[in-house]
Amino acid sequence: MRRLALLLLALAAAMPARAQSPERPYPERPIRLVIPFTPGGTNDIVGRLVTEGMAARLGQPIVIENRGGAGGMLGSDLVAKAAPDGYTLLLGGSGSLTIVSLVHARVPFDIVTDFAPIGLMGQGPNVIVVHPSLPVRTLKELQAYARQARPPLSYASPGVGSTGHAAGAMILQALDVEMEHIPYRGTGPVLNDLVAGRVQVFTNALAPMLPQVQAGALRPIAIAGRQRSAAMPDLPTTGEQGFPQVEAATWFGLLATGGTPPERISRLHAALNATLAEPEVRRRLLEGGVEVEASESPEAFARFVTEDRARWAPVVRRAGMRTE
């Protein structure tokens, strides 16, 4: 009996300790990454490449879920409303977060409070191209030609309210010229008409346009970024050509649902940055037109998103791109 009593006392003493034991290590099950666009684009390529390395470091698979629609709003909203446990992530970007939140009056989420920034992956500086029939090779030549063109030149975008639409508006404002905006449904249709000469000017991430540029079907006249692109080192930037206010890059970053525990955000940030430091990952991203730019911390990425939105807000306002 005395031995039984001692055993019961030992079990009773152990029960509170067991109840207060720490949580099981995160993650303990697969993580879902929502890409708010259809498969096959740059977002898809970046997301799959980076999450391969992250999954190996986290010890759990990361399952890709493509949820395209409404310029990225549908997929972003899915993550905004998910449980804040670090098991549902978003591949966010300039189009699906920054431009969407500025252009559309009824966005179903708040990009400040509904998401927990993890880290920046990289940026794909936009390249400004023209049809080779235009006798221009620099931004100043484009400015002079556009001012006397009758009828006005036309510039294309992948759609109303897209990053390409906003970037085109930024160029017109900086050059102080007028052009006709021709919206399309995606980059593919734009390139078809641009190569055919039915539109004359376009700005977009470099990757999808690189084959046409290399073939001579399109003429690049500037990189809309702070530094030259490693993929086209001989092409001057907009700043070098006297228009530093023209800065348009497509950025890619990782976010979780707002309210996700900070320690889980830190774990994801560490796995992301370690992956981006791999030479092979950096090489493959660069081949896709994306230059790696890791955030020092989740807080630094949050500041980046805020500053990016503040930079685009006056462009969208002046261009009258706001929709109800």
Image (cartoon, rainbow, N blue to C red):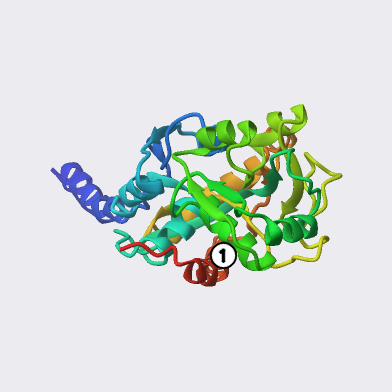
Find numbered disc 1 in the image and state the secondary structure of the residue it sits on.
helix
Task: Please determine whether, in this image, residue 110 is positioned above or below residue 26.
Answer: below
Point 43% across, 52% down: residue: 160
Residue 139, how many percent across, how many down?
76, 57
Point 42% across, 66% down: residue: 112
Q: Is residue 266 visible?
A: no
As shown in the figure, which amino acid type bears the numbered disc 1?
Asp
Residue 270, how many percent across, how many down?
59, 50
Q: Nearer the viewer, residue 271 or 95?
A: 95
Residue 216, how many percent across, how many down?
76, 31
Task: Please determine whether, in this image, residue 56 is positioned above or below residue 324.
Answer: above
Please give the residue where the numbered disc 1 appears in the rendered image.
308
Q: Nearer the viewer, residue 286 or 321?
A: 321
Point 78% across, 63% down: residue: 239
Point 47% across, 58% down: residue: 99
Left/right of residue 109 with respect to residue 137 in the rendered view:
left
Residue 272, how many percent across, how many down?
58, 45
Q: Nearer the viewer, residue 157 or 252?
A: 157
Given the current orientation, which residue lies at the most extreme left position? Answer: 1
Left/right of residue 78 with respect to residue 38 in the rendered view:
left
Query: Image quarter for residue 147?
Result: bottom right
Given the current orientation, which residue lies at the most extreme front position? Answer: 150
For label 1, count other residues whose C-alpha is less than 10 Å away and answer few (under 14), some (14-19) or many (20+).
some
Task: Please determine whether, in this image, residue 309 is positioned above or below residue 211.
Answer: below
Q: Is residue 262 visible?
A: yes
Q: Which image quadrant: the C terminus?
A: bottom left
Q: Which image quadrant: the N terminus?
A: top left
